[in-house]
Image: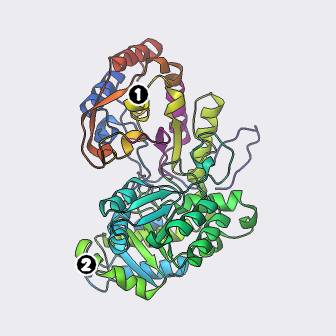
């Protein structure tokens, strides 16, 4: 998807694909939206699809698939053992990453479970640029600790740093000097999910790997969001601008010991797995696959998804294909900036991220601004986003609240799913909400599970602010949905 110039000077990302299968959507009235979010305990994970117009919850497992992927699904080989589909997928991974071994898993977090069970013990420290929810849960469950080493710029909401997901190399080196014996591996998340889909540079990835290898430890890449990161390396990094996507990928994978991924993101399908260079490492993890996932040649995945994944991975090497997401996200982010709405800059991958801290400064962190904003955006437009703030954190061992370093509402743009008019609608409703931000109040838990509370927790508004928001909407929009 090259940036094609418009004669009128407008700056619009132009799709290099056409839509051939569609899903009907409904937009329910604002009164129903207020009711629906109350029924869902103000948790957007608990909304029902019939009440949602734009589902921007996630880019996980909901990306548009290509005609070639659908065709490949028809020739999947569902042999329990020795499936030809598995061979095709392993060969594709070998071609792209040059990895000889692949352990299939039903999705990314299952791969994290296998890695954690193999390498994490009580007291282990796992350094990473930034944590992801499921990653951290697997490590802490086994008594390990996560050490976040992202550069300071990484958690600055507004920035022009092109690689906010970079590691602070000095802190990494210091940590190895002080506590290196407790570190089994370093995890590189490329790009970072919870701080706004921000990428790392090729230079930083290579430097991290060199440090870790100097101390004789393993480098593990979480490549779930690699496709966006590849786009940013190609377009933002001087030393990579003449490399193809395939060459950049190979430069990265040559430095990794292990690459795991959620294929719900990477590869436009559903599943996951672990690609490994070294036989000994492969053997250390292998027995966990049949025990927890399924036999070694499917690992809990549907073989149809595996066929689609092999094709999707190939398509990920195509710059036109992988630029659609970042260009749409940039369009949405730049428009919101122009309208004065606080968002994470520069635009990253995965989605557009609203900064709840500045959007609704009147809501204290203990009353979950990112969660409140998620409820408000849903009421304003039938748009489902995902809280990425304090609700997504785990409480401390003593039960106290762990306040997140950033309070974001993520509006994911699943790849090739939404049209530009839908993105424009989202921008319009968010701008309306921003102009009525004084109406928004906080939330409080009424049901709080002890782990991964953001999935199932239920909250109430602290006042009648949602009713007031509905009344303001009706006043401004009349009969309109
Ligand atoms: N790592 C990263 C960076 C992720 O973004 C995710 C999932 C996982 C691991 C876990 O993979 O879902 O296949 O088990 N992220 C999804 C999201 C859930 O909505 O951001 P999974």
Q: Is residue 61 above or below residue 34?
A: below
* In the image, residue 363 lies in the stretch drawn in magenta: no
Residue underneath mark 1: 376
- Judging depth in this view, the residue of 358 and 415 nearest the camera is 358
Residue 263 relative to residue 321: left or right: left
> Picture coordinates of residue 34 (x, y %)?
32, 25
Name the residue at 52% across, 48% down. Answer: 195
Span shown in magenta: 402-431
* N-term-proximal mark, 2 vs 1: 2
Label 2 Cα crowd, 10 Å radius (few <14 / some 14-19 / many 20+): some
Q: Quadrant of ligand 1?
A: bottom left
> Picture coordinates of residue 13 (x, y %)?
64, 46
Label 1 Cα crowd, 10 Å radius (few <14 / some 14-19 / many 20+): many
> Picture coordinates of residue 318 (x, y %)?
60, 66
Q: Is residue 361 above or below residue 63?
A: above
Residue 73 relative to residue 225: left or right: left
> Picture coordinates of residue 185 (x, y %)?
47, 71
Name the quarter where the N terminus is drawn.
bottom right
Specify the label residue 31 is tagged with. none
Could you say whether the residue bearing mark 2 is in a helix, strand or loop? helix
Q: Quadrant for residue 402, please give it.
A: top left
Residue underneath mark 2: 290
Q: CA distance from mark 2 to mark 1?
A: 44 Å
Q: Residue furthest front?
A: 178
Name the quarter where the C terminus is drawn.
top left
- Judging depth in this view, the residue of 295 and 81 nearest the camera is 295
- Judging depth in this view, the residue of 172 and 316 nearest the camera is 172
Q: Is residue 456 above or below residue 244?
A: above
Tell me if residue 33 can be seen. Answer: yes
């Amino acid at each position: 998807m090259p940036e094609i110039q418009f004669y009128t000077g407008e700056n619009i990302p132009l799709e290099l694909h056409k839509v051939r299968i569609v899903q009907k959507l409904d937009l329910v009235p604002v009164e129903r939206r207020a009711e629906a979010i109350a029924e869902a305990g103000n948790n957007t994970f608990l909304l029902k699809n019939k009440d949602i117009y734009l589902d921007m919850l996630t880019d996980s497992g909901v990306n548009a698939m290509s005609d070639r992927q659908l065709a490949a699904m028809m020739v999947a080989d569902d042999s329990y053992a020795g499936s030809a589909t598995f061979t095709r997928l392993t060969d594709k991974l070998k071609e792209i990453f040059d990895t000889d071994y692949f352990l299939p898993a039903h999705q990314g977090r299952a791969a994290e479970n296998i890695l954690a069970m193999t390498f994490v013990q009580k007291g282990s420290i796992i350094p990473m640029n930034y944590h992801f929810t499921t990653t951290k849960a697997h490590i802490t469950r086994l008594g390990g600790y996560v050490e976040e080493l992202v550069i300071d710029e990484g958690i600055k909401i507004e920035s022009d740093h092109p690689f906010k997901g970079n590691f602070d190399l000095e802190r990494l080196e210091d940590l190895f000097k002080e506590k290196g014996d407790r570190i089994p591996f370093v995890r590189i998340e490329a790009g970072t999910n919870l701080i706004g889909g921000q990428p790392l540079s090729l230079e930083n990835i290579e430097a991290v790997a060199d440090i870790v290898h100097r101390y004789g430890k393993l480098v593990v890449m979480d490549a779930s969001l690699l496709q966006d990161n590849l786009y940013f390396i190609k377009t933002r990094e001087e030393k990579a601008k003449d490399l193809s996507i395939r060459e950049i990928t190979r430069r990265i994978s040559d430095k990794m010991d292990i690459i795991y991924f959620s294929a719900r993101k990477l590869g436009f399908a559903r599943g996951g797995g672990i690609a490994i260079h070294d036989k000994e490492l492969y053997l250390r993890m292998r027995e966990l696959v049949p025990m927890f996932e399924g036999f070694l040649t499917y690992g809990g995945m549907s073989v149809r998804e595996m066929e689609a994944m092999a094709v999707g991975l190939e398509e990920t090497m195509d710059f036109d294909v992988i630029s659609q997401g970042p260009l749409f996200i940039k369009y949405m982010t730049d428009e919101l900036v122009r309208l004065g709405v606080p968002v994470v800059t520069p635009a990253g991958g995965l989605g557009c991220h609203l900064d709840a801290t500045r959007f609704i400064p009147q809501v204290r962190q203990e009353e979950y601004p990112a969660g409140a904003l998620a409820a408000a955006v849903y009421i304003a437009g039938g748009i489902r986003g995902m809280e990425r703030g304090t609700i997504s954190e785990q409480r401390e061992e003593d039960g106290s609240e762990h306040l997140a370093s950033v309070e974001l509402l993520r509006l994911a743009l699943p790849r090739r799913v939404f049209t530009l008019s839908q993105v424009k609608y989202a921008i319009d409703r968010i701008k309306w909400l921003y102009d009525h931000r004084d109406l928004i109040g906080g939330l409080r838990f009424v049901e709080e599970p002890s782990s991964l509370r953001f999935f199932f927790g239920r909250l109430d508004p602290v006042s009648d602010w949602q009713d007031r928001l509905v009344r303001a909407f009706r006043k401004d929009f009349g009969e309109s949905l």
